[in-house]
Image (spheres, grey):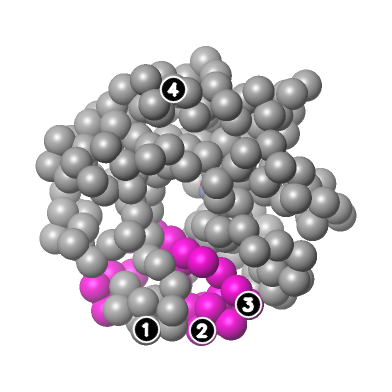
Amino acid sequence: APQPKIAPSMLSSDFAQLAAEAKRMIDYGADYLHMDVMDGHFVPNLTMGPPIIKSLRKHTDAFLDCHLMVSNPEKWVHDFAKAGASLYCFHIEATDDASGLIDKIHAAGMKAGLAVKPKTKVDVVFPLVEKLDQVLIMTVEPGFGGQKFMEDCVEKVRILRSKYPELDIEVDGGLGPDTIDKATSAGANVIVAGTAIFGAPSPKDVISILRDSVLR
Ligand code: DX5
Ligand code: ZN
């Protein structure tokens, strides 16, 4: 089975100290840094864009797992690649040419991920899995950190894992020590967590709890 990758969501960090927050997470054992990009159109919130990725890249060589919650995801591929993004994950609901977009992401030198919202059926990803580096199953409605984990979404993880034993399957939203086992027992191995990590007295301990759950 694929290795665990723990990806703190930097949305829950102190943006005014982003480089230090990133370093702290890597020191605590994080594998990826999850960067939530929101455009105020695909989701009802605004966060960050390529200039922030570019600034952060100057301070770290960490894997930047960029989650694009934007309309017209085709539009930003070049800018994110140039800024130093490692993986560009777009939403299937935001494009009519997912296959072409994956090619464009790879041509720009990034890994390609595909995200599905809670109400979107998992079947839509099957024809694309061969071309993808990662699939993200949302476990909250995208837009905000700190929401409640939607348990009914894990069935999609289970279906995907049964068909694709080696795929990197990421889960995002409401994950922490109390909910993680539901996601990992269904087969998730890439774990995003914002509130549960940054809000904890010991973020390092939470990162190891999440990792141990994947390995169990
Ligand atoms: C939600 C974002 C998540 C969010 C997770 O739209 O995609 O990455 O930051 O935050 P928590 O872990 O607090 O649910
Ligand atoms: Zn996210």
| Residue 38 visible in the shown view | no
Going from N to C along the chain, the mark reached first, 1 or 2, is 2
Q: Which residue is mark 2?
A: 78
Going from N to C along the chain, the mark reached first, 4 or 1, is 1
Q: Depth check: give the residue in front, 5 or 142.
A: 5
Q: Quadrant of the C terminus?
A: top left
Q: Depth check: give the residue in front, 198 or 156.
A: 198
- Look at 52% across and 15% down and name the residue there: 178
Alpha carbon separation for disc pair 4 and 2:
36 Å
**Crowd class of label 1 (few under 14; some 14 to 19; many from 20; radius 10 Å):** few
Going from N to C along the chain, the mark reached first, 4 or 3, is 3
Q: Which residue is mark 4?
A: 213
Q: What kind of residue is marked 3?
A: Ala
Residue 45 spot, x, y in % from top left: 63, 54
Q: Secondary structure at mark 2?
A: helix
Residue 99 within the magenta-colored segment of the rendering:
yes
Would residue 137 appear left or right of 129 to someone viewing this image? right
